[in-house]
């Protein structure tokens, strides 16, 4: 009988912690949460080499002892940014198998592909290596996760005939962000299963909404939590067999399991889907910088990634979470130091090209003052 993935996947990126240090995972509580989810029908556990400073895979491996390994499929990811030589492929995979206490990994992803990591992996013949790893049984199926623009996403999908799946950031706010709806449809049309990550936008869509959004939810006949609106929207999308949720507490596990039980195509009515569109517009109305991400300001001669910087800042204000915006701004995988706003020399070329007539240099100074180190 063909294996069928559970609608809800357990994302092991935001496990409960005993301190602010990501490596200090509360192992006993994390194991309790994962095993409860598995006992309730979850059969897909997603982790990655860098999650929780390397501890996530270890904790997942512990959670899957005592007979639980046979009940789930594991997905984990090659640290694409760390690969410098072809020998690194085996080095990291073998280390991950040891961490997970497993002889094989059913779903293996090339992590966070973007225009920086993708060419290097191709140059080192990652597909030839992956096929050997699949042949010797260490990997079951190959996929990739993605953080870049649609054109690159399409190129990657088309580059290899044996992709099984891909993983993309997708939620009702990010339909035009990164791969977006176009990418989800393109991948599904090519026969790839689409795994959705960040359906709650890092928890932002599960928070108490701002007043303008709360008024929209109040119009609904069926009252739902903010998290339920977002998760049900993700499960409504065609070509999406599994939605990952990075759960940090036992209560979140129980809530998400209950929502998953109520999910499925047709769960949301046409009027409810319209309310979600209205909520999206209300959120976007809170953004202080009227950037449409058109890209006309790029490339910047100094290397400043203007649209991405403005996206981080707008999201921080929109969701009342400037701390998260600060994290992404300073996180070198998300934004290199050479791409930050303080590299701006006030040349004015971007402002001449901006269709929204944004005072870009002024905003870059403000953003760096609020999000930058120091």
Image (spheres, grey):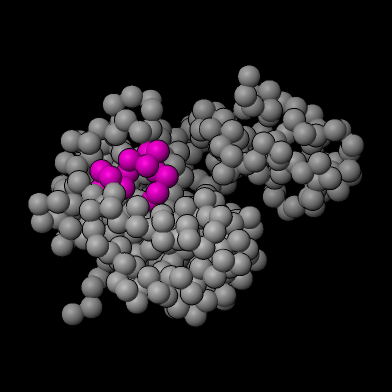
Q: Main secondary structure of the magenta part?
A: helix
Quadrant of the image occupied by residue 38: bottom left
Residue 176 can be seen, yes or no: no
115 or 43: which is nearer to us? 115
- The residue furthest front is 87
* Residue 204 image offset from top left, x and y in percent: 45, 38
Of the 4 image quadrants, the one containing the N terminus is bottom left
Give the residue at x 68% y 23%: 369
Q: Is residue 181 left or right of residue 137?
A: right
Q: How many marks?
A: 0
Magenta residues span 48-60
Q: Position of residue 355 (x, y in %)?
A: 81, 49
In the rendered image of this protein, does residue 27 appear above or below residue 145? above
Picture quadrant where residue 179 is located: bottom right
Residue 211 visible at all:
yes
Residue under the image location 16 percent in, 61 percent down = 71
Q: Is residue 117 above or below residue 360?
A: below
Point out the image quarter for the C terminus: top right
> Which residue is at 63% across, 63% downward?
119
Is residue 54 magenta-colored? yes
- Residue in the picture at 48% in, 39% down: 213
């Amino acid at each position: 009988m063909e294996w069928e993935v559970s609608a809800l996947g357990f994302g092991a990126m935001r496990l409960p912690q005993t301190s602010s240090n990501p490596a200090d995972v509360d192992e006993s509580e994390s194991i309790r949460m994962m095993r409860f989810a598995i006992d309730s029908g979850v059969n897909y556990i997603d982790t990655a080499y860098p999650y929780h400073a390397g501890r996530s895979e270890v904790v997942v491996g512990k959670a899957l002892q005592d007979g639980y390994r046979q009940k789930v499929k594991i997905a984990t990811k090659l640290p694409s940014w760390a690969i410098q030589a072809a020998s690194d492929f085996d080095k990291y995979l073998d280390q991950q198998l040891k961490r997970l206490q497993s002889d094989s990994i059913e779903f293996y992803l090339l992590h966070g592909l973007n225009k920086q990591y993708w060419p290097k992996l191709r140059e080192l013949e990652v597909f030839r290596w992956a096929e050997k790893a699949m042949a010797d049984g260490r990997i079951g199926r190959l996929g990739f996760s993605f953080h870049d623009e649609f054109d690159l996403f399409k190129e990657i999908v088309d580059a290899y005939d044996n992709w099984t799946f891909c993983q993309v950031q997708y939620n009702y706010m990010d339909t035009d962000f990164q791969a977006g709806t176009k990418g989800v449809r393109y991948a599904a049309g090519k026969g790839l299963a689409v795994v959705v990550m960040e359906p709650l936008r890092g928890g932002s869509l599960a928070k108490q909404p701002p007043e303008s959004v709360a008024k929209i939810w109040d119009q609904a006949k069926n009252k739902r939590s903010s998290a339920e609106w977002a998760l049900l929207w993700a499960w409504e999308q065609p070509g999406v067999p599994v939605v990952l949720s990075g759960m940090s507490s036992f209560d979140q596990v129980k809530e998400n399991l209950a929502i998953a039980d109520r999910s499925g195509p047709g769960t949301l009515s046409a009027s409810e889907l319209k309310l979600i569109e209205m909520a999206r517009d209300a959120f976007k109305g809170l953004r202080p910088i009227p950037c449409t991400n058109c890209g006309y300001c790029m490339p910047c001669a100094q290397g400043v990634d203007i649209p991405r910087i403005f996206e981080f800042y707008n999201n921080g204000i929109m969701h009342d979470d400037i701390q998260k915006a600060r994290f992404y701004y300073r996180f070198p995988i998300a934004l290199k130091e050479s791409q930050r706003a303080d590299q701006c020399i006030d040349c004015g070329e971007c402002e001449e090209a901006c269709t929204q007539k944004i005072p870009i240099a002024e905003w870059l100074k403000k953003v760096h003052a609020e999000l930058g180190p120091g």
